[in-house]
Image: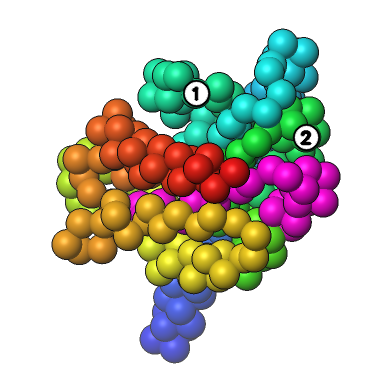
Amino acid sequence: MLATIIVLSILVVLLITYVILVSLQKKKDTDKAYKKGADDLFSAILANGWKKKVNDFNEYNKCVNKGGIIFVGDSLTDNYNVYEYYKGYDVYNRGIGGDTTIGLLKRMNESVYDLKPSIVVLLIGINDFELVENSTPETIYQNISKIVSEIHKNLPDTKIILESLYPVNKSDNFKIDQPSVMRKSNSKINEVNEKIKDIPGVYYLNIHDLLLDDNKELKIEYTMEGLHVNTFGYHFVTKIIKDKIEEIKHEA
């Protein structure tokens, strides 16, 4: 009798354990499905916004003055009010929020070649860590090298100012939005910068190091939420870029 009770007790425990495990797996599968759905929706929103921007650029380019200065990149460029910061310069903004090195390679005509610029200011790659599958510092470097090479091939007289990737801030400061910086690490950003600084045929600007605080993170006073720079940050980098533009102009 006792043996029967023990066996039944064991069976009950096993059954309960099985039910719990099945429930946990279902929750895991559901969470994964929701996450995939959210990622797919986010990707669709980005794709639609990207296409609209490229179409807009195509229209804007009908009115540009050839030989100007263009700023090309992702949201760090898209958010950069170059028309205010570079008064007196013939500048154009060709940044798209959420863009990657792969995305930029697909819009070189609308964003670079059609404008026939004298100078290109290039900042791209930070989004690859999160939005490009299997992205590594090496693949980001390879794509940036290809972007530079394509510009040289199509516009041999155009000068290229290549900015380092900016650092991020992942501290517990109340300003920091952790989801915005989730897969972006300063160590990997440093790896990219170590590689791209030696790309031939560019004026490399190591703005990254000038934005660091004592903890080797993006200075809190220069950022909105840990990833994007704010007005103070743009004001700071503008002087550095302007100095390089003037240096290039005096070389001509």
Query: Does residue 127 appear anywhere in the picture?
Result: no
Query: Does residue 166 appear anywhere in the picture?
Result: yes
Q: Work out whether 234 lies above or below 58.
A: below
Q: Are marks 1 and 2 in contact (CB under 8 Å)?
A: no
Residue at which label 2 appears: 113
Residue under the image location 49 percent in, 71 percent down: 194
Q: Is residue 147 magenta?
A: yes
Query: What residue type is disc 1 on?
Result: Tyr
Residue at which label 1 appears: 89
Q: CA distance from mark 1 to mark 2?
A: 19 Å
Left or right: where 10 falls relative to 220: right
Residue under the image location 17 percent in, 62 percent down: 214
Q: Which stretch appears magenta?
A: 146-168
Binning the other alpha carbons within 10 Å of mark 2 as few (below 14), some (14 to 19) or many (20 upward) gives some
Which structural element holds mark 2? helix
Residue 225 pos. (x, y %): 31, 38
Q: Work out whether 88 lies above or below 154.
A: above
Residue with the most extreme bottom position: 3
Quarter residue 229 falls in: top left
Residue 18 pos. (x, y %): 54, 66
Residue under the image location 74 percent in, 31 percent down: 116
Query: Looking at the image, which is closer to me, 105 or 127?
Result: 105
Choose mark 1 or mark 2, whichever is in front: 1
Residue 31 pos. (x, y %): 54, 47
